Each structure stands twice: as structure tokens, then as C-alpha cells.
Amino acid sequence: MEGKTKRAIVVGIPGVGKTTVITRAVEELNNLGYNARLVVFGTVMFEEAAKLGVKHRDEMRKMPIEEQKRLQEYAAMKIASMQDDIVLIDTHLFINTREGYYPGLPLYLLNLLKPTNLVLVAAEPKEILNRRINDKSRQRDLVDEKDIAHELEIARIMVAACSILTGAPFSIIMNRDGMAENAVKDLINLLSDKKV
């Protein structure tokens, strides 16, 4: 990869299956001979938030905006120092707070992360709703299909805006039910010189 780290920010709304796609893509990229790493932005933030007494990741979005901002900066600086061939950053474009939608990737974070690629993992609203209902590992707010369609629209707008601000190209990869391997291949082909 010419000695330069490819830094891909991979985003998607909760329940889209983004983490599954990224995890499999990183495994396959490593099998292809790349030094690829998956970094979950929220986990890096949570490691710092835990020092403040936060007990669950989903509690972070209920914190004051200024505290969320400090945690984001910490995570971005830590991730920006990674020098792997390919770093896939698993994150969200926005956090739904009581004050409104708070951007997960405001300009100051994009400037710290310096992405080479932006990828939005998407799915049909009905598929996302079913995945959220069946995921008992997270404490999710109750929403309906219309709310999810609205979240997807906001995500598309935000990823396009991030692309304009950074100059990094963006792609939308569909993760349809039962077809995760296709989404994994699409992501690998986007980031790799070796097509699968």
C-alpha cells in the first residue's frame, strides 16, 4: 500500500450490521496479507468514560455535549496515531441526544482522523428494525420503520458532507439480510488492491 496508512471511516446507523461487516472484512484483509486493524470508536471513547464512572456504552450519549466532545477528541487522537496498512474505524455519524442529533464526526474530528475513505453501510429500514428488536445486547431506544428511514436519510446527508469537508471519497454499501458476505466483499474491494 506504498507505505501509507489507508484510514477508512465506516459508519452506519445502529442495527445496520456494520460491525459484523467490518469484522469479517478485517479478517479477510489480514488473510490477503495486509496489516489491517478494526478500531471501534465508541469503545475507545468508553475506555476513557469508564474512568469517569460510566458503566455502559449507551450511557455516553446521555452525558453533557462538552464531555462527549472531550471523549471524541481523545479517541480520535489515539486512532490517528495507528500506522497499520488499513485501519477501519467503526463509528456512527450521529448520536441521538436529548438536545438533538449530535454529529459523531464533526470537522475537528475529521481533521484529526484524516480519512482516506468514508463508507456508509446501509440496509432497508424494515431489516434494521428487525435487527434492533432482536439485539438484546444493547439498550436501544424504541423507534419504528419511519424513524429508521429518517435516520438513514440523515446518515446519507452527513456522509456526503464529511466527504466534501475532507476530500475523501465516500461509498454506500448495502448489507441486506442473509447477504453480509456481499457487503464484506464490497468493502474489501473498495480498500484493497487485491480483488476478491
Image (cartoon, rainbow, N blue to C red):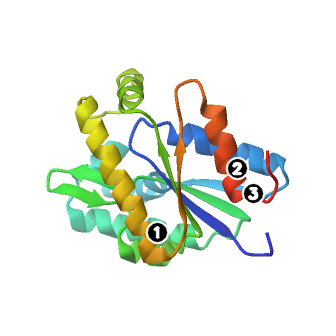
Give the Cα separation between the discs numbered 2 and 1: 20 Å
Mark 1 highlights which residue? 163
Q: Position of residue 14 (x, y in %)?
A: 39, 40
**Mark 2: which amino acid?**
Ile
Left or right: where 18 falls relative to 28 = left
Circles 2, 1 touching at the beta carbon (< 8 Å): no
User: Which residue is drawn at the image coordinates 40% and 21% (left, top)?
Assistant: 134
Residue 98, percent from left and from top: 15, 51
Mark 1 Cα-neighbour bin, 10 Å: few <14, some 14–19, many ≥20: some
Q: Amino acid at mark 1?
A: Ser
Labels 1 and 3: the sequence-earlier one: 1
Q: Residue at x 59, y 61 (%)?
A: 8
Q: Is residue 181 visible?
A: yes
Q: Are marks 2 and 3 in contact (CB under 8 Å)?
A: yes
The residue under label 3 is 192
Give the vertical position of 153 relative to 65 (above or below): above
Tag 3: amino acid: Ser
Q: Residue furthest left?
A: 99
Q: Is residue 133 above or below residue 196?
A: above
Q: Give whichever of discs 2 and 1 has the lower sequence position.
A: 1
Which quarter of the figure has residue 117?
bottom right
Checking the image for residue 188, the label placed there is 2
Dot 1: element: helix
For residue 32, the mark is none
Q: Residue at x 42, y 68 (%)?
A: 162
Q: Is residue 74 left or right of residue 7?
A: left
